[in-house]
Amino acid sequence: MQSKISIIIPIYNTANYLPTCLNSIINQTYQNLEIILIDDGSTDDSSIIADDYAKKDHRIKTIYQKNAGQSAARNTGLTKATGEYISFVDSDDQIKPNFIKTLFDLYQDNAASLAICGHEYRNIKKHTAKYLYASPLRPRRPYESSKSYILKLLAKDGRLYSCNNKLFRTAVIKKHHLTFDEKLNFAEDTKFVLSYLQYVKGEIAYDPSPLYIYNFGTTTSTMHSTSTHWQNWQTSYRNLKTWLGKNPTLIEKFWLHLIHFRWRISYLRSKRRAKQ
């Protein structure tokens, strides 16, 4: 019997993209799914589309709530999830047919605590696409602390930042009462991922295949606007320092400063893109 996997999809005014998203999920090669749709107070036809799909597929559960933000919608999904594993998909994105199967197999083939895959980044306005994080993930070396290894990954590339290209163990989330910070509207998923990694002992398993399709520039995308405010990056940096804890090692301090430098560049780039 295949393990049940819960897929949590927060929805807010994504009627133009939702059918493509849902079709990509219901047609996964891995079929033992619990598909949880949380409509976060949509004012377009999203709820109608969600209802229509739920009538046709018994695996789909629909939940409706007043608009409270993406984090609140994801948290609602977490309270309803009954699968052994959990994955998050945004309703204006999509996944390739073997997304779930590939991530699930990473758990079976490795002593893994988190399974991750690569991204396909599509710029909707420019009609361009590129693959992200195509290089293999270097395993943690015996002498490296877990936090030093994670900080290095955060400093060198972005494969840890999002919650969307991953498969999490539900038991870890439930045991430690992990949720998304509803006070944040920027990098809240990074905070969730780091909190999860704080409580696991296994290694990170990675498949570079670009199985998660991130659509940048949709009408509901907020990343382009929230990233232009330096205070959001500063809040994320403070959260990262809190996660690291007191008395970091010299190497941990080094990676922390490098992350701050990287984020400063990312902020300046986002400001420049906003002016274009």
Image (cartoon, rainbow, N blue to C red):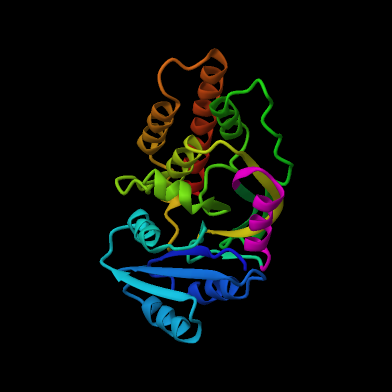
Residue, far right: 135
x 55%, y 18%: residue: 254
Say which quarter of the image contains residue 124: bottom right
Give the residues drawn in magenta, as a range: 97-114
Q: How many marks?
A: 0
Within the image, what quadrant is residue 237 found in? top left
Q: Is residue 159 above or below residue 108?
A: above
Does residue 18 appear left or right of residue 230 in this picture? right
> Measured from the top left, where is residue 247 in percent x and y?
44, 15
Residue 110 within the magenta-colored segment of the rendering? yes
Question: Which residue lies most toward the left here?
Answer: 66
258 vs 133, left or right, is left
Residue 68 in picture, x, y percent from top left? 28, 59
Rendered residue at 34%/71% (across/down): 63
Q: Residue at x 51, y 24 (%)?
A: 256
Q: Is residue 24 left or right of residue 70?
A: right
Find residue 36 and report its horizontal and vertical position in percent: 44, 68
Taking the view exactly as shown, the residue that stands out farthest to the front is 1
Q: In which quadrant of the rendered view does residue 25 lie?
A: bottom right
162 is within the stretch colored magenta: no
Task: Name the image quarter holding the N terminus.
Answer: bottom right
Nearer to the camera, 245 or 182: 245
Q: Predominant secondary structure in magenta?
A: helix
Residue 20 x, y percent position in the rendering: 56, 74
Residue found at x 42% / y 26%: 241
